[in-house]
Image (cartoon, coloured by chain):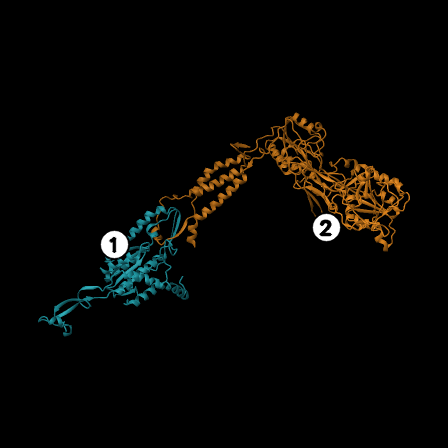
Chain colours: A cyan, B orange
Amino acid sequence: MRPSADQLRARAEAASAALPALMLSAERLAAALVPGAHGQRRAGMGEDFWQYRPATAGDTARSIDWRRSARSDAQFVRDREAQVAQSAAIWVSAAAGMDYTGGPNRPSKRDRADLLALALAMALLAGGERVALAGQPPRPGRLQAERMAQALVARPALDRDEDAPPAEALRPGQRVILFDDFLGDPQPVLDYLGRAASLGVQGALMQVLDPDEDGFPWRGAVLFRSASGALRHDTRDAGGLRSPYLARLAERRELLASAARVAGWHFGMHDTGAPPSQALLWLWTVLEG
Amino acid sequence: MLLIGPIGFLTPWILAALAALPVLWLILRAMPPSPKLVRFPGTRLLLGLKDPHPVARHTPWWLLLLRVLAIAALILGFAGPVWKPSPDQVGQGPLLIVMDAGWAAAPDWPQRQARALRALDQAGAEGRPAALLVGDGRDEGALPFLPAAELAAQLRALRPAAWETRYPPDPEPVLAGAPSGLSVLWLSDGLDHPGRAEWLAALSGRGSVTVVPPEGPRQSLELVPGDQPALRLRSTGAAAPDVLAIGLDPQGTPRELARLQPGEGADDEAGVISRLIPIALPSELRNRITRFEIEGHASAGAVLLADDSLRRRKVALVGDDRASEGQRLLSPLHYLRRALSPTTDLIEGGLGDVLQASPDVIVLADQFGLAEAAALRDWVEGGGLLIRFAGPRMAASERLSEEPLLPVRLRAGGRDIGGALAWGEPRSVAPFAADGPFAGLSVPGDATVRAQLLAEPAPDLGERTIAQLSDGTPLVTRAPLGQGQLVLFHTTANAEWSSLAISGLFVEMLDRLVRSARVSAQAPEADRAEQPFWLPELVLDGFGRTTEPQDTAPVAAADFARGPAPGAPAGLYRGGERMAALNAGGPMALADWPGAPIERAAQAPGLDLRGWLIALAALLFALDALGSAWLARGRQRAMA
């Protein structure tokens, strides 16, 4: 059932109350990372000095570094290291299952994914990158972080169990980071990865899971129901289902990891019971490389 | 009854249901609890998985234990467990229950009925015939032996009677049809009654007799007639409860008017302690009392209905009342009337008329030369109290010394002490002797005597004087005559000779004198010819509660004199103008039981565990409900 415009607005207003807290915690996370432009280890457009080289035909007189040239007979040109501000697209799944939390003292998966996404976006923006949520035009600047935060908070949860990243929004040269629990149908994700690989888009998959989903603590007679209620599974002995479930989960991870490897992507996992900084560091190093 | 250790079971066959408990355990065990409802995003990964052990999960063992224990408690409870049941004292033969059903059996009547019903139940369970002999004097003929169950209703309908326990006079015809080998249960009221020993001997010869003694002491209340009526409280125990005087208050509502406490003096007559309680109450209060009862003792024997003997005295006033309206305050009868009317019934008229009404007291105000002197003398000798007052007519008489019916011989002329032509002051009244009828009355200083009649000196003048003036001359003299007495006030009953008549002392003195009068209506049999029948006005039941008489058959005076009996329950009876009470309480004697075992109260009842076990089962079921709710809490949360 789609919420009416009024309901949506009311929900957004309620949610935006949490916005400063989200911004603050994301900022604190992002401050732990060392921001920096991505040197391309070759001469080009940039700010940092790269090398002096003898001027060749074609170099304009303005490009000659006269101070260096005055120390010898030849003319030298001061090259700067090429710096390319990248554009990154971040996508957080809005599937109904993302709202799940197994315990009262743990954030929901969606909250954690939003936090990671915004912190990563802030770090990237601080590094001068252009960042946007998938499907929106990437922009640089601090203001973009607030826009993204608002969009993340205001985005309504779906009433479906699955949410797929928008494949048509892929652009060559983009970095794409997907946050999801990847517990739904894996086929759209695999298709997405294939298409990204064909476009030369690199990125990372981050699987955010609740410890309950990771550990399967139930016993006895349980009637399992998916978040939207579309899927049900009745069991008399939930404790006996634990190892088959864990095997299936490992299988799913292996499938995603191998698909990511083939596409040149990275596959990471995060547990909402663990501190978020770890996942953020992993994402940062992956994107750095 | 099945005995297992100290526990007996009344309906042991129900215990067979305990065998079903293991089956129940298996069934309950196989029944899975309702599943928890869990919202789980990873459900897709679970689809198609098979349960490794289809019924691996059971109802928790403690819940199972609770349920099985609850059902076991129910089964045990309905099997009628009794902790340390009373041993089967009544033998195996046909059961004969002898119930003492007089007033003495009333205080613990429900316990007696319960004990008898228990015995009937046992006999019924064992198929023994039973018979019921009720000691209320009404049973006739041979006892029928019936199946025990048919007697239960009769036993429940039984009520104690408002007379003493009575057994049929001859045991033989009653026991004619009794089988041999009787087992007799005698529910005694603890007192001895006529014929009890014969019955005990007759029953002992036909079987075994077990005696159930009463619980608590028996008490009875009896009126001790006399000049000052008193109550006699008899008790088989040491307790000395208060006696309540119940009557109508000025608004006409029955209530407790006074509470009489038994004095210290107690006589012990073979185990029965009797105490005398004087009815020391003002006349006005005493006249209101309708009954006395022993506090906290519901028995007809503990209730004493008040009748004429306790009530107002009938006082006849005889005097010259020809004074006109203007001279009313000069008439002696006016003062007597005012003094006596609150506490007595007054009759006025000529002496011949009032003698026919048989008053208790006759007051003669300044009368001399009596015409009916012989009849009056007979009346006084029969127990009447004659109070005479002096006056001018007596003083003027020449033959005063020959006047009959005076306590002392009088000197002619009289004496004038406070007059205008006399020396001296009017004399006041001297304080009363501590042992006289006026003892304790306070003498007001302004009650003075100006004139009086003087007595001839005589050796017995001093002991006949019960009140005197401050100079030692007699004011009131008294002398016995036959069973009655003569009293003379040596002054007038009006204010002519003294101011005594207008003082409060006058009223109190008259009240004391009147109360000392004997009641003329003594024993009803005294005038059997005049009063052949008595009609019940109000009767008591065995518990001492007043009821309307059911059958208003008149009671012959001869039967009436013998006390309460089957045809004449204790109560208030009317015969013409007179009311007479028939009271049940009387002398008591403890019963002894040679050769018969006496059932002790300590070993009589076993503790019935049924209620406790069923309560325990209910508690366990409640715990089970709580536990189930606790198990289902996950589901509740998932639904929310």
Residue A32 placement (x, y as % from top left) = 27, 60
Callout 2: helix, strand or loop? loop
Q: Is residue A270 visible?
A: yes
- Residue on which disc 2 sits: B250
Chain of the residue displaying label 1: A
Viewer-side residue, B561 vs B9: B561
Residue found 15% across the figure and 69% down from its top? A78
Image quadrant holding the C terminus of chain B, namely bottom left
- Residue on which disc 1 sits: A258
Query: Looking at the image, which residue sits at the far right?
Result: B398
Q: Mark 2 vs mark 1: give the one in front.
A: 2
Residue B567 placement (x, y as % from top left) = 75, 37
Residue B599 placement (x, y as % from top left) = 61, 31
Image quadrant of residue B554?
A: top right
Let me know if marks 2 and 1 both belong to one chain: no
Give the number of marks.
2
Q: Amino acid at mark 2?
A: Pro
Seen in the picture, residue A191 relative to B75 is either above or below; the reply is below
Q: Amino acid at mark 1?
A: Ser
Query: Looking at the image, which residue sits at the far left?
Result: A73
Chain of the residue displaying label 2: B
Viewer-side residue, B626 vs A230: B626
Image quadrant of residue B125?
A: top right
Viewer-side residue, B528 vs B404: B404
Q: Is residue B500 visible?
A: no
Mark 1: give few (<14), some (14-19) or many (20+) Cα within 10 Å: some
Marks 2 and 1 in Cβ contact (< 8 Å): no
Seen in the picture, residue A57 relative to A163 is either above or below; the reply is below
Mark 2: give few (<14), some (14-19) or many (20+) Cα within 10 Å: few
